[in-house]
Image: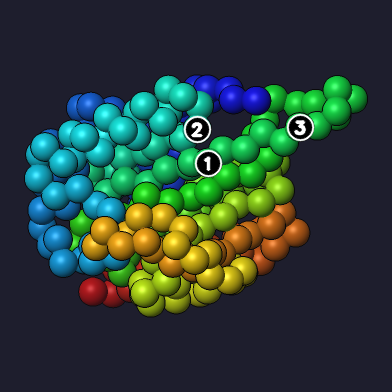
Amino acid sequence: MTTRLAPFTLAGSQVRLEPLELAHIDALTAASAVDPSLYQWSAVPVGEEATAAYVRTALAARDAGSAIPFAVVRLADGAVIGSTRFFDIEYWPWPPSHAHALPDACEIGYTWYTRSAIRTAANSEAKLLMLTHAFETWNMVRVCLHTDERNERSRAAMLRIGCHFEGILRSHRLAVDLTPRNSARFSIVAAEWPGVKARLKNMRAHYDEKSRTN
């Protein structure tokens, strides 16, 4: 079963996740151009042509019902600071007596931020918004996250919020360096969500306090 979910906006105190559109191409081009060295292990578009192709590919996945992509907007200044998305959205084959229209599982990924958003509340709040929607609006049973096995910073961030490390998927996807990528697989299941939610709220509060004292 494949269903195209209607685009929606998720808003917090620091960032707004708004449906990705072609109109975001220029702002995303500027965001990724600040420091391309941040994206050694991530497929982040650099340059207008690459960014336009990236956005069009994301919108094609949206139209096919397999993804919901967002532009991440910083509320303080209205700047587009990156992008993220739900993808690999799954609908399980429930029998008619249990059928429902909501997705059962998904992955969160294609997440990247410009330099000024690193080590701020942006990522923790974006994850909080997305996971809250996944577990409390869609009532999902599982959310997965993957990263290049070599991406120590991303792996540490997933563990920090309480994701469960499931193992390494060998030659899982094409890596940025055009080699078969081993992916570190992490997940959160519904029973773990309250603990992860508490961690994300604490992280957001920490970054909020840090920004006020700087």
Disc 3 target residue? 93
Q: Position of residue 144 (x, y in %)?
A: 57, 55
Q: Is residue 69 above or below residue 108?
A: above
Disc 2 target residue? 66
Quadrant position of residue 104: top right
Secondary structure beneath dot 2 equals loop
Q: Is residue 35 above or below residue 15?
A: below
Q: In whole angstroms, how far apart are the C-alphas of marks 2 and 1? A: 5 Å
Taking the image as shown, residue 176 lies to the left or right of residue 158, namely left
Crowding near pointer 2: few (<14 within 10 Å), some, many (20+)?
Answer: many
Rendered image coloring scheme: rainbow
Judge by depth and name the residue closer to the eye, 211 or 141: 141
**Quadrant of the drawing holding the C terminus:** bottom left
Residue at 27%, 30% (x, y): give it. Answer: 56
Q: Are marks 1 and 3 in contact (CB under 8 Å)?
A: no
Query: In terms of sequence position, does the residue under pointer 2 or pointer 1 come before the other?
Result: 2
Q: Amino acid at mark 1?
A: Asp
Disc 1 target residue? 88
Q: Position of residue 171 (x, y in %)?
A: 44, 62
Q: Position of residue 6 (x, y in %)?
A: 50, 22
Residue at 80%, 32% (x, y): give it. Answer: 94
Q: Are marks 2 and 1 in contact (CB under 8 Å)?
A: yes
Quadrant position of residue 207: bottom left
Judge by depth and name the residue closer to the eye, 171 or 21: 171
Secondary structure beneath dot 3 equals loop
